[in-house]
Image (cartoon, rainbow, N blue to C red):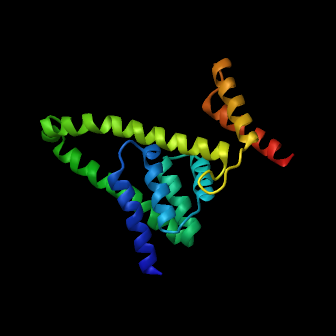
């Protein structure tokens, strides 16, 4: 059991170490690692993305906690969460210690300028993957069209443009209510 927990820890440690741009940029790597490791299915990953988005706290921590808990219970949640948080913690400590010398270097500026479009691409790929899964279902295995998800997406998108006073919290609650109501029909 300890070997499986260490493997889960290092999976999330790698995710935390090699993804830049926050939780959304981590989604493609999380999806790949969870599927290749046999930890979660495509449907479970997409459900965890939705849950992690709607719960308070950092997205990466939430999804690591949910995936770890689903796989190995509470101890799995602790190992996965520590794995995803530890690289950032270590890097921030090092940067804080060497910040003046590090940020001003040509190499650091060059690396940061190259990372910006990569981060944008990762976030776009994650959003597109979730959108395609919501509309088409498990589009890599079977092609289905989820009209209810498309209706909810359309209504929430239109409401977000027409009613400027609606906050993201309102939109999440509206989509949750619509999903609960429409999927029960």
Residue in the picture at 66% in, 55% down:
142
* Residue 162 point in image, percent of width and height: 67, 18
> Furthest-right residue in view?
185
Q: Is residue 124 left or right of residue 170?
A: left
Residue in the picture at 40% in, 64% down:
11
Front one among 95 and 34: 34
* Residue 153 point in image, percent of width and height: 68, 34
Q: Is residue 57 left or right of residue 108?
A: right
Residue in the picture at 67% in, 32% down:
171
Is residue 176 something one can see in this rendering?
no
* Residue 159 point in image, percent of width and height: 69, 24
Residue in the picture at 40% in, 36% down:
120
Res 67 quadrant in image: bottom right
Q: Is residue 13 above or below residue 51?
A: below
Is residue 79 something one can see in this rendering?
yes
Total marks shown come to: 0
> Furthest-bottom residue in view?
1
């Amino acid at each position: 059991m300890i070997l499986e927990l260490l493997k889960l820890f290092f999976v999330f440690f790698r995710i935390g170490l090699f993804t830049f741009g926050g939780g959304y940029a981590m989604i493609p790597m999380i999806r790949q690692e969870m599927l290749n490791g046999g930890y979660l299915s495509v449907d479970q990953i997409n459900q965890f993305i939705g849950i992690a988005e709607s719960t308070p706290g950092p997205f990466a921590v939430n999804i690591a906690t949910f995936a770890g808990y689903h796989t190995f219970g509470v101890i799995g949640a602790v190992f996965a969460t520590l794995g995803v948080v530890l690289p950032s913690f270590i890097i921030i400590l090092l940067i804080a210690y060497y910040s003046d010398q590090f940020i001003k270097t040509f190499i650091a500026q060059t690396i940061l300028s190259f990372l910006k479009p990569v981060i944008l691409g990762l976030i776009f790929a994650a959003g597109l993957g979730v959108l395609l899964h919501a509309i088409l279902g498990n589009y890599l295995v079977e092609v289905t069209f989820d009209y209810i998800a498309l209706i909810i997406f359309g209504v929430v998108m239109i409401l977000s443009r027409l009613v400027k006073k609606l906050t993201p919290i309102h939109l999440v609650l509206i989509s949750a209510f619509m999903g609960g109501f429409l999927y029960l029909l």
